[in-house]
Image (cartoon, rainbow, N blue to C red):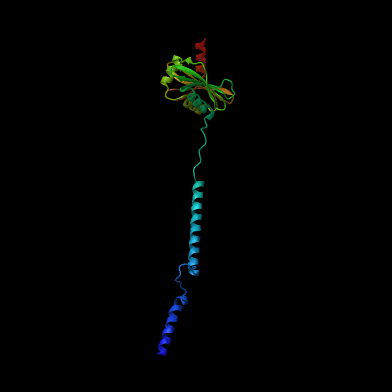
Amino acid sequence: MKTTRTAIVALASAALLGPTACGGSTNPDEPVGPADTHTERSDDTSSSQTSQETSSSSSSDTSSAPTSSAASPTGDPVLAAITAAEDEAGGTAYEIDDQDEDGTWEIDVAKGDQSVEVEVGEDGTATAGDDDDDLDDEDRAGLDAAKIDLAEAIEAALKEADGTFDDAELEEENGTHHRKISVDVNGNDTDVLVDVTTGKATPESDDDGADDDADDN
């Protein structure tokens, strides 16, 4: 009987010491062992690497993003002035002149049967004049026939004569309407005729000028 009790006590002691000897824990509030700590560090490292890869990818996308292109080489201040004048008067620009040569443009805008003179300053501010004139019949006919606007005519002229834009006016010759674009090329004035229907730009020849002088006489 003594031997049996001793054996029972020994077995009970072994059962209680078993979990401790194996390094386990039945208490969920106890700190994790070395193996669990290693696992958490591995997760932290993986998360850090993922964050670095995402940041690198974002940086690469930003560096490869396209940038805006340069503005039109045909003289943006002139084209901007035309747009400002049309917005101010609510019509279609058909003639433009820099009479004072100070960066201020005088632009004639057709609005219905009226011609509105708009002044556009160097800063882009547009101011319409108080007095409107009747639109000339010849100018009205030229605008009705036009398939290209004033800005497009200026661009075509500057491609034909590489220089600095001076002024433009709407004219009619032998039943053909065109815009006469004056361009300063190396200090010399060159006139380019731009057909309002086809957009074809042709430098005005000396013969054309001679014919105009003869008609004036």
Q: Nearer the viewer, residue 130 or 96?
A: 130
Q: How far from the left and from the top, in percent, is residue 115? A: 47, 17
Q: Is residue 71 above or below residue 94?
A: below
Quadrant of the image containing the N terminus: bottom left
Residue occupying the point 43% across, 79% down: 15
Quarter residue 185 falls in: top right
Q: Nearer the viewer, residue 93 or 5?
A: 5
Q: Nearer the viewer, residue 80 or 50?
A: 50
Q: How many marks?
A: 0
Q: Specify whether residue 168 is in view.
A: no
- Does residue 24 appear to the left or right of 184 in the view shown? left
Q: How far from the left and from the top, in percent, is residue 157? A: 50, 26
Q: How far from the left and from the top, in percent, is residue 34? A: 50, 69
Q: Specify whether residue 213 is in view.
A: yes
Q: How far from the left and from the top, in percent, is residue 63? A: 51, 46
Residue occupying the point 48% across, 60% down: 46
Q: Is residue 58 above or below residue 1?
A: above
Q: Nearer the viewer, residue 66 or 191?
A: 66
